Amino acid sequence: MTIIQSTYTKNIILISSLIFSLLLAFNGSFNKLALIWEYSNTYGHGFLILPTTLWLIHRKKNELALIEAQPSFLGLVLVGLTSLFWFVSVVSYINVLEQFALFSLFIVLTWAFFGWKVVFFLRFPLAFLYLSIPIGDFLIPYLQFVTADISVYMIKILGIPVYRDGMYIQIPNGNFVVAEACSGIRFLISTITIGVLYSYLNFTKLYKQILFVLICCAVAIIGNGLRAFLIILIGHLSDMKAAVGFDHLVYGWVFFAFIMGLIFVIGHYMSDPIAELEKTQVKKDKSVAQKFPSLIFTTFTLLVLFLGPLLKYQYEKNVNLLTEQIDKSSLTDTDFKDIPKFDNNWIPSFPRADEIYISKSTSDNVEIFIAKYYAETDDKEIISYQNRFFDEDLWSLKSISSHEITDISDNNIPYTSLSIVNIQGKERTIRVTYKVNNMLSANKIEFKLLQLTNKIMMTDFGGEVIVLSSLDPSNADNDLDKFMYEGFFKVKQHTILIE
């Protein structure tokens, strides 16, 4: 057996042990991630990222044997800091940060056992792991607007009469809505992932790699707008007999295949010659001796790795003891079928809230909804994909913006304003504010950080969301401004507990 083969075999054993240790120590995070990959059409590619990363590393096995590798004390420290960062992310229930820390552990563990030179050499395969993080849902409303804009623009070019109200698009033959599934987020995420991998394998210059990824983004966004336009056009030409139901899905997949083909054609003409790609490979005549970590170093590194999970276990133990003392006589696991809706069939949906308050201020014509959480858990969070401010089957988002108002006591009240519209053209204005330990925020990230601070200080383990609304589009802002100015901090006095 050659030195290179022997080194490669030892590295395989070490890497397998590290992956097993990560899966064991952070099995809860990996399980949550796997569930998202399994049930989400947008992020299903996550299952392929780790095998692809291992394949990319395997491609460089000969070059890796030529790089000096040795355990790093700095890498060990980074393992501990990253494990602590993971714990903080878990406690704050910011899934993106939790998953970012999770995949960062692959990098810092590689640093600890092999040194920074190996990490630098494998910078792309290791960074490629981050593409398995389910991030991008925040782009959905903006992509919906872009898709609707492109569709309406193309329809007008053809001279077809069209009327748009928010995400609803009406033509003489029928009505269409640009739903979340039509936003193109699936196209965009998949295209970016494939584009990043393709640019790494086929381009040597950084500017080409960046340019190709940007082209992939543009083609995916514009292409999805054209796809929506073609579906509307087919519906118009077929008198709504095609481009609906199963046909809609088929056209989507066919168009996705066309988009990918177009991207590969563009990539083919941009690709560097094979000879130029081969020049970038490391070429030496003999391998460099690799220093493997000692048993003491390995043991200590694994102990540091488990620091975050141990803190999480202790934290959850303390939270359980505290929450047991809370009066559980209020609403738990609300069944929203029993909650009355406001006018025009509208009500927010927070199915895992501990308490729901709902009422209407007749003097100000303001409807009030409050969802309160005693303590958050993995499946019970204030900011979660399960929670909705309106039923997307009945309402469509028309606009969204952030504002702040000062009340009669000079308290600043930040809020997010949403304008929604239904198929009948009825509009509704919604204002959303998050609250934890009497501190307010309209920014989800800022609110998560406030929650984290309170959890660490053990002053508040949950929080609440306050939703105010007015159905009168002409006076909505005035009614809501008046209500928030005069009595926002006494809002619960206007509400009743739903049981």
Image (cartoon, helix red, strand yellow):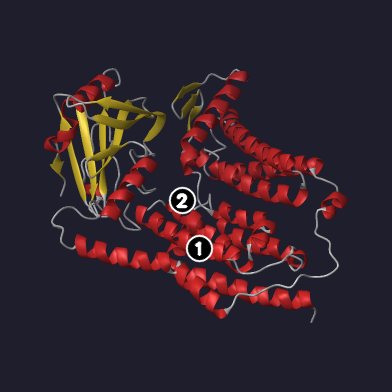
> Where does label 1 land, which residue?
77
Q: Dot 1: what SS?
A: helix
Q: Could you classify mark 2 by the number of other residues whose Cα lies within 10 Å: few (under 14), some (14-19), or many (20 or more)?
A: some
Task: Kindly identify the residue that appears in the image at 40 percent across and 54 percent down.
Answer: 89
Q: Nearer the viewer, residue 453 or 130?
A: 453
Residue at the far front: name it.
Answer: 73
Residue at the far right: name it.
Answer: 275
Q: Dot 2: what SS?
A: helix
**How many marks overall?**
2
First-in-chain label (1 vs 2): 1
Rounded to the nearest angstrom, the CA distance separating label 1 from label 2 is 23 Å
Q: Determine if residue 243 is in view.
A: yes
Q: Amino acid at mark 1?
A: Val
What x and y, as percent, mark residue 292? 64, 75
Residue 195, labelled with which disc? Answer: none
Q: Quadrant of the N terminus?
A: bottom right
- 215 displayed left or right of 186: right
> Where does label 2 land, which residue?
96
> Up-down: is 10 above or below 418?
below
Task: Kindly identify the residue that appears in the image at 55 percent across and 24 percent down.
Answer: 152
Q: Amino acid at mark 2?
A: Val
> Up-down: is 176 above or below 340?
above
Q: Determine if residue 52 is in view.
A: no
Pair 1/2: label in front? 1
Q: Nearer the viewer, residue 192 or 226?
A: 192
What x and y, as percent, mark residue 306? 44, 69
- 19 displayed left or right of 346: right
What x and y, as percent, mark residue 443? 37, 37
Q: Nearer the viewer, residue 364 or 408?
A: 408
Q: Could you classify mark 1 by the number of other residues whose Cα lies within 10 Å: few (under 14), some (14-19), or many (20 or more)?
A: some
Task: Kindly identify the residue that appears in the image at 65 percent across and 64 percent down.
Answer: 54
